[in-house]
Image: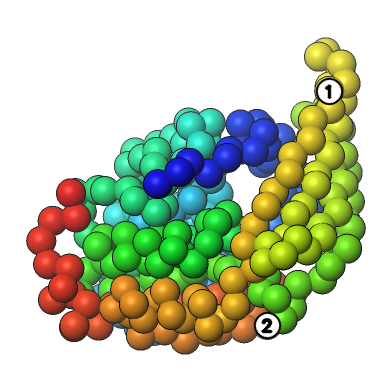
């Protein structure tokens, strides 16, 4: 499969963490919510794989809910930062579409709309098939999607300024629709008392999959699936359970 571009912000873990901490992203609450959905469907779940784990900000809370947690991300800087944040947790670098680990998990998560970076339905289908190969019978997969064509806000702009460790970081973005995808142009300015002022930009192209497309990918991989809207602002969650037919087709080591 072709590679997916790694945007500059994912090579700047320090800036990434500072921005979302300053914007008040509640990783602990999100970890609790995801755990509730997993426990509802598989109360005995003990192991979890977090795909697109980033800097480990969900993992640091998920370790309180599961006996074993593992993380995977495509960006080396994210994995290195996660290793410092959650020492002792197994971490891997890999592509969500085709990674191969020697272990199955009771739960697989993919949060923060990371699945939106997949370029098309074929890639989404491949990703869910990969998740299925790494899920135990009756295991649960939880995906936080990106916006869909039905709820995407064309021309959305946002901005934030955060202060941390003597630095000031400003982030502004504008998101527009381009065909079946959204295009988000983001500008970062980082003012550091020693290093001076630096500026970089990112462009995030993310697929606007419909709910039907997500459901079809889950079902083709052997999951029963339901959509759970967020109580607050957000794209919601798709929650799938690997059924007996799928586990029969996916027998054997995923490696």
Is residue 29 something that shows in the picture? no
Q: Quadrant of residue 223?
A: bottom left
Q: Residues within 10 Å of mark 2 (few under 14, many from 20)?
A: few
* Residue plotted at (35% across, 85% down): 224
Q: Position of residue 164 (x, y in %)?
A: 79, 35
Q: Name the residue that disc number 2 marks.
A: 231
Question: With 143 as the anchor, is 153 left or right in this view?
Answer: right
Between disc 2 and disc 1, the foreground one is 1
Residue 191 seen in the figure: yes
Residue at 74% of width from left, 39% of height from top? Answer: 202
Give me the C-alpha separation between circle 2 and circle 1.
Answer: 38 Å
Numbered circle sitting on residue 30: none
Left or right: 65 with respect to 44?
right
Residue 46 horizontal/vertical position (percent): 27, 65
**Residue 198 circle label:** 1
* Element type where label 1 sits in the image: strand
- Residue at (47% x, 86% y) in the render: 226
Looking at marks 2 and 1 on the same chain, the residue that comes earlier in the sequence is marked by 1
């Amino acid at each position: 499969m072709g590679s997916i571009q790694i945007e500059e912000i994912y090579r700047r873990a320090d800036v990434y963490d500072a921005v979302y901490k300053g914007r008040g992203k509640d990783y602990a609450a999100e970890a609790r919510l995801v755990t509730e959905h997993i426990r509802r469907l598989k109360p005995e779940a003990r192991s979890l794989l977090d795909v697109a784990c980033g800097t480990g900000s969900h993992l640091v809370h998920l370790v309180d809910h599961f006996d074993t947690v593992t993380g995977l991300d495509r960006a080396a800087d994210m994995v290195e930062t996660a290793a410092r944040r959650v020492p002792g947790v197994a971490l891997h670098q890999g592509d969500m579409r085709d990674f191969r680990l020697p272990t199955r998990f009771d739960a697989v998560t993919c949060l923060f709309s990371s699945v939106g970076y997949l370029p098309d339905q074929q890639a989404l289908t491949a990703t869910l098939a990969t998740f299925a190969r790494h899920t135990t019978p009756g295991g649960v997969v939880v995906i936080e999607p990106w916006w869909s064509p039905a709820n995407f806000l064309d021309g959305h702009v946002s901005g934030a300024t955060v202060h941390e460790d003597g630095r000031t970081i400003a982030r502004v973005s504008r998101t527009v629709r381009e065909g079946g995808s959204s295009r988000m142009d983001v500008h970062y300015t980082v003012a550091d008392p020693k290093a001076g002022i630096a500026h970089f930009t990112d462009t995030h192209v993310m697929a606007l999959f419909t709910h039907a497309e997500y459901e079809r990918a889950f079902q083709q991989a052997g999951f029963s699936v339901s959509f759970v809207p967020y109580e607050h602002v957000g794209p919601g969650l798709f929650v799938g359970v690997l059924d007996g037919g799928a586990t029969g087709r996916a027998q054997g080591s995923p490696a």
